[in-house]
Image: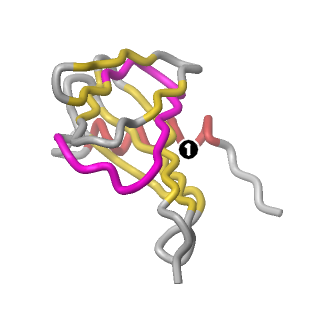
Amino acid sequence: MNKLSLTALASQQLDLARAASSGRSAHTVYGGHEHSLRQTLIAIDAGQRLGEHENPGEATVHVLRGRVRLSAGDDSWDGSPGDLLIVPDARHDLEAVEPSVVLLTVSLGRQG
């Protein structure tokens, strides 16, 4: 069994995001290309966004710090710490309303 502190990792990634020209930083905490489940901690500085993109599979965004806005077309959902946002099966965007850290969980289905 492996254990890691999302709290410590969130602080580290937020520092990296603030220093990055993109205003973002990410670290995969579980999974990867060889797994069907992937969890990625994403830090985004205030006012930055991931930019509109396709949904790679079933996905959720768990807000750990800050406030974010998930948008798809004319719909949007605000999230704050403790909120779990279900990512729609449509092109969408994630914006940090304030410096934020989220845990993105994606299920890509069975690989192989």
Q: Is residue 46 left or right of residue 10?
A: left
- The N terminus lies in which quarter of the figure? bottom right
Q: Amino acid at mark 1?
A: Leu
Residues rendered magenta in the picture: 52-69
| Closest to the observer, 83 or 57 | 57
Image position of 64 with respect to 28: above or below = above
Q: Quickly name the residue at label 1.
A: 9
Q: Is residue 98 left or right of residue 10?
A: left
Q: Is residue 38 left or right of residue 54?
A: right
Whole-percent x, y for residue 70 in the image = 31, 27
Question: Who's the residue at 35% across and 56% down the image?
Answer: 56
Whole-percent x, y for residue 31 in the image = 57, 65
Which picture quadrant has residue 14? top left
Residue 64 highlighted magenta (yes or no) = yes
Which picture quadrant has residue 88? top left
Q: Residues within 10 Å of mark 1 (few under 14, many from 20)?
A: some
Whole-percent x, y for residue 92 in the image = 24, 37
Whole-percent x, y for residue 7 in the image = 61, 35
Residue 63 highlighted magenta (yes or no) = yes
| Closest to the observer, 13 or 38 | 38
Which picture quadrant has residue 100? top left
Total marks placed: 1
